[in-house]
Amino acid sequence: MSINCRAAAALALLDVVDKQKSLTPVLVRYSEKVPSTDKGLLHHICYGSCRHFFSINALSKMMLEHPLPEEARPVQALMWVGLYQLAYGDTSEHAAIHETVEACGQLKQDKYKGLLNAILRRFQREKTELLEGLKGSDVPHYQHPKWFIKSLKKSWPNQWQVICEQGNIQAPMCLRVNTHYNSVSEYLQKLEGADIKASKGELSLTSVYLDKPMDVFSLPEFEDGSCSVQDEAAQMAALLLDPQKGEKILDACSAPGGKTCHLLEHAGGEIELTAMDADELRLTRVHENLTRLKFNAVTLVGEAQHPEQWWDGKPFDRILLDVPCSATGVIRRHPDIKLLRQNQDIDNLAQLQFSILQKAWQMLKPGGTLLYATCSVLPLENADNVKAFLSEQMDAQLQNIELSSGIDTGFGWQLFPQAQSHDGFFYALLKKV
């Protein structure tokens, strides 16, 4: 039996906010409960409500005389859903209010229909003044958690506002052209022939941006391997590591396989590549990408911080170390990070990253190169880790990186999320001397 789309969105949000569940699997479950015609709207509301959570939550508090009781949490979630639609969505205001209030019935909260209707209609009348009232506090105004804003202000006094602003908008859809299959200019012509508007990226030589997101299977020759979806900053991994034909390469923490395949594309498939990941289920995505692009690689389940459990002792020429991180550079793609990530997580992640870096270094040949990468904008996970590693690893030498975007931290290159461009990313290239 299907349920009202707004009711499903409210329940999904409660799973994220109260139960600290990741939005992606939550949406998979609730997408099955709504009519097929509402799946897109459900995703839109849930992503948008997470993206703007700190403002819609502040608005609900401003308009409620008293907090709702615990048993009325579904009503609180419906309030978030309704306020998101009225403040930031593109649904008609009448439909947004009517459908959200009606959802009270499906969630067995009929007695709150009048309250919810009154609050949403008040916001409809006083929208400009109420939104203006958010500007007095950083958290609802910049729509990120307090700990994160504080950290950004300290680390990036000149960039923190742009980082927050980018975290509140939908990221553009970027493609990585498979130059083993066709050139970037050739693929742009194919897109033009299919009446798909696109433009070349400025950071990566293999990047193309679509004017509008679309189903990948509508892209010319996608199933044949002509291109892949990958952020432009992430595309720099293969270009910076620069694997050469015949070399033995390790892609640690490889799932879902975007960088794995790009390494193979970059070397024309003529490298001995091992793609490893701790998550066996996610490794299936690596297999799928390899199959579509017609490349071969050794795939294995293992943890980068425990090479003794899987490594055969034969060193690698180059290692891509895209370590688990806070993902604070890709918040606009995964807005639930704002609600799930906590300040104490960063210390724990930094320790894990440092341990992985130490272990991976043991697997690198003398004269070999290791690329340390994260999709984080926090120095504790990035430059601080590299600085600490260099201070104790005497045979490690930092190599120069100079890109057309971002800044040199002194211990690696930091990219920040940019409007209609790449996500936030960090790279440090290390040579074993």
Image: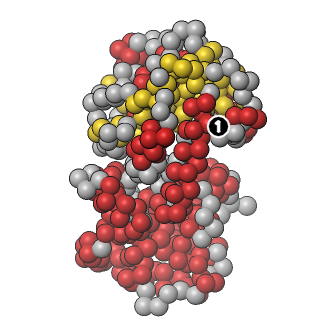
Q: Nearer the viewer, residue 35 or 64?
A: 64
Picture quadrant of residue 137? bottom left
Q: Is residue 114 above or below residue 52?
A: below
* Label 1: which secondary element: loop
Instruction: Write the residue at 41% across / 51% down.
Output: 378
Q: Position of residue 299 (x, y in %)?
A: 70, 26
**Scheme of image coloration:** secondary structure
Q: Nearer the viewer, residue 219 or 301?
A: 301
Q: Is residue 227 visible?
A: no
Instruction: Write the residue at 55% across / 38% down.
Output: 357
Q: Nearer the viewer, residue 198 or 373?
A: 373
Picture quadrant of residue 8? bottom right
Q: Is residue 417 visible?
A: yes
Q: Nearer the viewer, residue 282 or 362?
A: 362
Q: Residue furthest bottom?
A: 66
Q: Residue furthest right?
A: 309
Q: Is residue 262 above or below residue 111?
A: above
Q: Position of residue 381 (x, y in %)?
A: 46, 48
Q: Position of residue 210 (x, y in %)?
A: 38, 32
Instruction: Write the residue at 31% across / 69% down.
Output: 138
The residue carrying mark 1 is 304
